[in-house]
Amino acid sequence: MHTSSKEDGKHTMGDSNAGKDFQGTNLAKPIAYLGLLVCVVSASACRDGRSELDQLKDKTARLEERLKGLEAERASLRQEVLHLREIRGQLISSSYRKMNPQQVQVMEEKREKWEKLSEVSQALGLKRGSIVADVGAGYGFFAIRFAQMVDSADHVFGVDTDEELVRRMKHRIQKLGLRNVQVVLGSTGDPGLPSGLLDAVLIADTYHEMKEYRSMLSHLRQALKPDGRLVVLDYF
Ligand SMILES: C[S@@+](CC[C@H](N)C(=O)[O-])C[C@H]1O[C@@H](n2cnc3c(N)ncnc32)[C@H](O)[C@@H]1O
C-alpha cells in the first residue's frame, strides 16, 4: 500500500489509507461542497420552518382576538336592532290602532297591490273548505279575503287580543255579510282556537309583537291538524 501510494505522489503524511484513497479522487471537492450545501439548506429550512410556524401561530392568535371583538360587536348590534325593531313595531301598531274606517280602506286598497295575496294563500295551502285562522287579525285584512276564498260556513277565525280591534273587525264582517268568519278575542299566549281543527294559520305582521310566542306556538300546534300549516309573514 505504501509503495503504491508513493507512486501516486498525491497522499500526505499520517493519513489513513482510506482517507488517502478518497482524497486521491477528483470527487473529493464536489462532495465536500455538496455536504456543505446540504448543511446550509437544511439549517435554513429548519430556521424558516420554525419562524413560519411562529408567524402562523401569531396570525391565528391575532385573528382569533379580532373575531372575539367582532362577535361581541355583532351581539351588541343585534340587541340594538331588536330594540329598534320593537320600538318601530310599537309605533306602527299604535298608528294602526288609531286608524279611522276611511284610513283603513285606503291602506287596504294599497295593500291589495303589494301584499301578494295569492302567494300567501298558496303558502297556506288554502282551498275551498279549508279551515284557517288569521292570528293577530287587526281589522281583518286577511281574514276577510280568506273568507271570500274558502267560501264555506264557519271556516275562518279572525283572532286578536285588542278588544277595540275585535269589535271593529266584527262590525266590518257583519257589514260585508260574511257568515263564515268567527271573530275571537284571544289572550297574548293563547289564541283560543279549537283543537286539531285547522288546516292553516297565518300570523301576519304580528309575530314580532308576540311576547309569549312559545305558548302561542304551542297552542297553535294543538289547534292545527297534524298536516296543518303555519305561515308567519313579517316585514321585520
Ligand atoms: C300590525 S297589526 C297586523 C294586523 C293584521 N295581521 C294585518 O296584517 O293587517 C298586529 C295585530 O296583532 C295583534 N296582536 C298582538 N299580539 C297578539 C297576540 N299575542 N295574539 C293575537 N293578536 C295579537 C295586535 O292587536 C294587532 O291588531
Image (cartoon, helix red, strand yellow):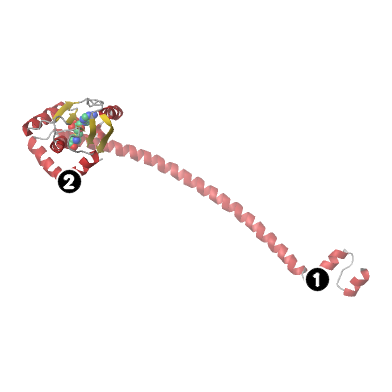
Residue at position x 11%, y 43% from top? 109
- Mark closest to the chain's N terminus, 1 or 2: 1
* Residue 92 position in % (x across, y down): 19, 37
> Label 2: how many residues lie within 10 Å, few (<14), some (14-19) or many (20+)?
few
* Residue 201 position in % (x across, y down): 23, 34
**Can you tell which quarter of the image residue 147 is in?**
top left
Q: Quadrant of the N terminus?
A: bottom right
> Label 1: how many residues lie within 10 Å, few (<14), some (14-19) or many (20+)?
few
Q: Nearer the viewer, mark 1 or mark 2?
A: 2
**Can you tell which quarter of the image residue 110 is in?**
top left
- In this orientation, which residue lies closer to the viewer: 145 or 227? 227
Q: Which amino acid type is marked by label 1?
A: Thr
Q: Quadrant of the C terminus?
A: top left
User: Which residue position holds label 1?
Assistant: 25
Q: Quadrant of ligand 1?
A: top left
Q: Is residue 13 left or right of residue 217?
A: right
**Can you tell which quarter of the image residue 167 is in?**
top left
- The answer to whether the residue bearing label 1 lies less than 8 angstroms from the nearest atom of ligand 1 is no
Q: Which amino acid type is marked by label 2?
A: Trp
User: Which residue position holds label 2?
Assistant: 114
* Residue 228 position in % (x across, y down): 27, 34
- In this orientation, which residue lies closer to the viewer: 102 or 221? 221
* Residue 75 position in % (x across, y down): 37, 38
Q: Is residue 12 left or right of residue 107?
A: right
